[in-house]
Image: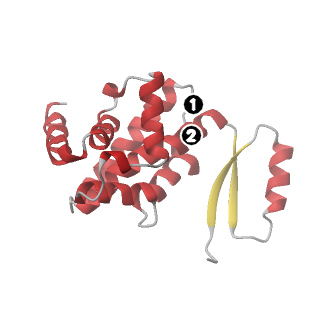
Amino acid sequence: MGRHAFADVALIDPADFVTVRRLFQGSRLICMQVSDMHGGSWYVILKNVYAIVFGVSDELKLGDNMRGHLMVTALAELSAIGKYFGAETATPYSYAGLGDLTSTATSENSHHHELGRKLASGQCVKENITGEGIHTLKMIEKYQLFNRQEYPLFQLVNDIVCAPDELVKRLETYFEQLKTW
């Protein structure tokens, strides 16, 4: 499309990064070397879960302030989950973290943003909900990778996906919980 693009390249050996940089020389792709392969991998997976609630919010016209809340809360939860798995402190603020979250959560071209919109408008039934974020939710549940209850926004998305017909009720419960924290 002729636009600039930005990406983290998780490599331990700086010589490997030089090779990658050469591969994209002359293109509009700007790569940054990072060493936290583990943390970056978690963030690019988990951001798909959070992107769903951004689509819900946009479909319900909850406003820009809500979008700000979602971004701050999603980033805080991503940081905490990453820390739990041993991610480096700076990784949530990288292209793989905040960059990818922002792009996926706010893009009209994002599958997960669109999924959230469809859930909010009643166009999705539980059996037809698919995507990386949905798979992530299922795997976290199946393998008990972390306690979802410790991450209220993550839990909200899980609740919405598991019971789309109760979406508005789940949102109201979430808002009430925010008042008590």
When asked about the image quadrant of residue 15, the answer is: top right
Amino acid on which the number 2 mark rests in the picture: Thr
| Residue on which the image places disc 2 | 91
Please, what secondary structure does the residue beneath circle 1 have?
Answer: loop
Give the vertical position of 133 relative to 148 (above or below). Answer: below
Relative side of 80 to 73, left or right: right
- Name the outermost residue toward the bottom: 2
Name the one closer to the observer, 143 or 16.
143
Is the residue under label 2 in contact with that under label 1 (CB below 8 Å)?
A: yes
Name the one closer to the observer, 88 or 101.
101
Give me the disc on residue 87: 1
Relative side of 94 to 106, left or right: right
Please, what secondary structure does the residue beneath circle 2 have?
Answer: helix
Amino acid on which the number 1 mark rests in the picture: Ala
Residue 120: % across, % down? 24, 56
Residue 176: % across, % down? 13, 37
The answer to whether any part of residue 176 appears in the image is yes
Residue 96: % across, % down? 57, 47
Considering the image in quadrants, where does the C terminus appear?
top left
